[in-house]
Amino acid sequence: MSDFYSGSYLLSPFVPYTGLTVDKLNFIVCQLVAIALGRPFQKYFAAEPGSSNMARYAMSFVVGCLLCLFCFGHQILHVLFQGTVCLLIMLYADRRYARFAACIFAIAYLSACHLMRQFYDYGGYTLDITGPLMISTQRLSTLAFNIHDGIVVKAMEEADRKKKTDDQTEQQESDKSSEKVKPNLTERQMQHFVRDFPSLLQYYTYLVHFQGILVGPFVFYVDFRNYMEGTIPMPSDLTKEQREHYLRGTSRILVVAKWTLFFALVTLTMQTVFPLNFLAEDGFQSYSLISKWFYMTLACFVIRQRYYFAWSLGELSYLSSGCGFTGINKDTGKAEYKTVQNFDFNGVELSTSMKMAIDNWNISTVHWLRECVYERVPSKHATLAVFIASATWHGFYPGYYLLFISVAFFTTVARLARRHLRPHFQGSETAKLAYDVVTGLASLTTLNYGAGAFALLDLYKGLRFWWSMYFIVHVIAGLMYLGFVTLKPASSSRRSAPEAPRRAEVAQ
């Protein structure tokens, strides 16, 4: 346990009985408290559409502060300071630059805390305030852009109202009005723009609400405000009882709770059997390549369970409070809660491509990068901007950069492979299945190969691990790249349907 941990030691007598360090025990207990408070919060501080809901906001903020204080002590001041400076920037800076200034400051402050953390606890996994700061950085930077989008929308609406003095027909006016906003904002930006600047209580509650202060996931301000004020969009054909049922999310809570227990059991029982650090030790190098592959696969699978467990606790805290409902799936007829879902287990572990794995891992961060970075810079610089933002957001351990740089290359090769090879396997169901199996194994191997270096953190350990694997993924990817760039793609007549529009693809 690192000496720089500033959270409470009240639960330290229970540490010997749990096998957990006090920082992780505090985190789990606080998340369980947040989950337990969900139903009472719904009942006694129910949202009232049309009212200020001040008591509801205040309770969420106060409990969030208390949980953060218990876990991280005085370090909560970092979150409040970061939020306060960003608030002043959004209020008083030039509107042309305020959103960029707030975003840059939030990331810069987080980066400073990452560096301080690495100085005091290099290579350690002690929980500290950098976790909540990573989530607050997403909230603050996106809010700054969403507020600016709201200013743009209101300015265009005002311009439309002035045009009504012209001698035009009502139909012409509505046609022009409908064309004003769309060219300037994407569909997602139109969904999330903030029309009115939040009050101080709304602002700080969004920053430090108890449902998501410790581990998130990141939720857009508009979605959070709709939840707090009881204005979550619902299908018009639902009865009052059905709406309440879906908002309670009992069925989803049960599913997530079962998976959370599974993730916890795997982590507790398997992390000592397949320790990650063994990947960089001499004993690992003595294994055969196939044995190394099996060990790497299992060790990295176990490591991911930690993240799944923490993210599931975060999802449960939102769901138990009635937050997260996004609609009814038209195909299955089941309720969906995508607002607070931060990963798709099957989408990651059974992925058939790197893109599929990335899309289903740390989903809320992918949304943040896309809307706050990818869509805000010129397209020719978008990918580089996403890489820089994602890298600095994670921190400065060399292992992170081994993964990010490699994944950028691996993703490029995967696109070329799909373009050249996939059309040849679309002739029969057997061929399609064979293609999916091979690409699935390749994706799994690449994912674990990169994740191992990421989790080891240290440059020497990461390179030593890859050296023991003979840099096999890099070598194969390099040979494939050289081969593909000298070949022509498969003929268009045999190609599959066009791929979806490109998006920011960065390992999260």
Image: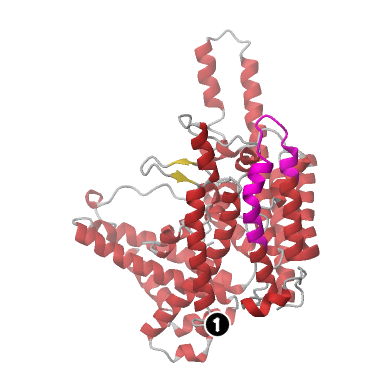
- Magenta part mainly helix, strand or loop? helix
Q: Quadrant of residue 197?
A: top right
Residue 495: x %, y % from top left: 26, 51
Task: Say which quadrant the N terminus sits in.
Answer: bottom right
Tell me if residue 202 can be seen. no
Q: Nearer the viewer, residue 23 or 105?
A: 23
Residue that mark 1 sits on: 277
Task: Say which quadrant the C terminus sits in.
Answer: bottom right
Q: Nearer the viewer, residue 483 or 50?
A: 50
- Residue density around tag 1, few if under 14, some if 14–19, many if 20 or more, within 10 Å: some
Badge 1 element: helix
Q: How many marks?
A: 1
Residue 397: x %, y % from top left: 63, 72
* Residue found at x 67% / y 44%: 143
Look at the image and say whether residue 441 sits in the magenta stretch.
Answer: no
9 versus 257 height, above or below: below
The segment highlighted magenta reads 30-58
Q: Is residue 186 left or right of residue 71?
A: left
Q: Quadrant of residue 222?
A: top right
* Residue found at x 41% / y 60%: 346
413 versus 202 height, above or below: below
Look at the image and say whether residue 57 sits in the magenta stretch.
Answer: yes
Tell me if residue 244 can be seen. yes
Check the image and tell me how it is coloured: secondary structure
Residue type (three-letter) at the residue carrying disc 1: Asn
Residue 100: x %, y % from top left: 69, 47
Q: Nearer the viewer, residue 44 or 382?
A: 44
Q: Is residue 69 left or right of residue 325?
A: right
Residue 373: x %, y % from top left: 59, 50
Q: Is residue 1 left or right of residue 245?
A: right
